[in-house]
Image: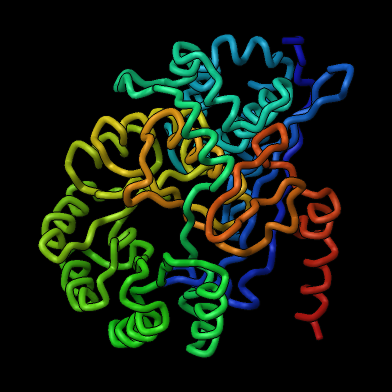
Amino acid sequence: MQENKIIKLTVRDVRFPTSLEQHGSDAMHTDPDYSVAYVVLETDSDAALKGYGLTFTVGRGTEIVVCAVKALSTLVVGKTLKEIVSDFRGFYRLLSSDGQMRWVGPEKGVIQLATAAILNAVWDLWARVEGKPLWKLLVDMDPAKLISCIDFRYITDALTEQEALEEQMLKEGYPAYTTSCAWLGYTDQQLTQLCSEALAQGWTKFKVKVGADLQDDIRRCSLIRKLIGPNNTLMIDANQRWDVNEAITWVTKLAEFHPLWIEEPTCPDDVLGHASISKALAPLGIGVATGEQCHNRVMFKQFLQAAALQFVQIDSCRVGSVNENLAIILMAAKFNVPVCPHAGGVGLCELVQHLILFDYISVSASLNNRMCEYVDHLHEHFKSPTIIRNAHYIPPKDPGYSCEMLEESVQKHQYPDGEVWRAIEQQGKQ
């Protein structure tokens, strides 16, 4: 591997006005503008190689993450890729546990989001140097080398690369479920149209946003269950709306629609609360799914040890990038809990597909109750957008972590000076 010294880090605030059409609306986020803090690492290589990374946000507050990335950039610029990956665990600790900046963390909140954006760019750069998509870089990596990237001691020996499973994924893809049909702000007409179109495209697994009004939830779940039929899979997502007892009562009243899981029923930090909900709903055959707002691997460890979830929802941009997600995937395997990643937003589908492919090929070797979320928004802004065929993720082939955005899109949607946001500002003045 060449040295590939990182000579520059840039970060931009890129926002998409998804709130205008209620895309992404749920019980807690009624007006989300899907956004990213978008990082580019430039190197001194002869080929002028760059690494691209991002972390997901929902509008206001993205500027805070951008500031955090800039604060961490001094720990990155000047290092070589070879130096970083030779001690990736140490580099992860450097970013996540800086002696002064960790006071506003540690390993959670804005600093963790900024760490994810930077590390995502480093992994993208490494995969590009190796000429492989990230999932293939991970699958081919020596197990000892892979473990050396993880800052955790609670690890399983589950790593077993299976060539036949890789061939299966290349041929068939990884099963996905859709959230695009049932955002909370959509009308019944939109729900009906989008569900009908999804069924015609081969979708069999659907997630519905709930939590704002019980009677409205009963009506919407009834509508969607009738549309998709009794044999297709339904999940519900409250986005942290309820307290523990309220969650149990509310979901019990939705049990007639046979949801596979209730997602984020309460505060994402309440491990014991999730355990109580899991225990109460188990007789109804309803599991608990959570993870998209879990700050770090330690929280996942506690959720797993407390039997507080039945589905692990990793997120490619919430915890400390690939490094930390590898630890979470391995812990989930140890507890025999399926990993069903959170995705959607801006770029989350593009990134997390690499992680779930690695999980299947090198760790779980199972598709039982396993699926990856898909949201059909904003993929056109990426150089290597997610490919879905017959409701399955098709493994990406381009080298890297699929993070690179189209420069034209970045410039148009950069906040607040991009063309799109200037136009919205002018409309507001009229």
Where is 259 relative to 77, above or below?
below
Residue 216's place in the image compared with 152, above or below, is below
Question: Could you say where residue 392 lies in the image, as x and y percent from the top left?
Answer: 53, 54
Direction from residue 104 to residue 302 in the image, left or right? left
Q: Is residue 293 above or below residue 234?
A: above
Q: Nearer the viewer, residue 359 or 185?
A: 359
> From the image, which quarter does the N terminus lie in?
top right
Q: Position of residue 177 (x, y in %)?
A: 46, 60
Q: Viewer-proximal residue, 298 or 252?
A: 252
Q: Quadrant of residue 375?
A: bottom right
- Residue 162 in picture, x, y percent from top left: 45, 26
- Would residue 78 be found to the left or right of residue 104 on screen? right
Q: Residue 304: x and y, percent?
A: 24, 39
- Check the picture and name the quadrant holding the C terminus: bottom right
Q: Residue furthest right?
A: 46
Residue in view at x 33 percent, y 71 percent: 231
Q: Is residue 293 visible?
A: no
**Residue drawn 19% across the image and 36% down it:** 305
Query: Could you tell me which residue is drawn at 47 percent across and 53 percent down?
Result: 175
Identify the residue at horizontal 56%, vertical 50% (top origin): 393
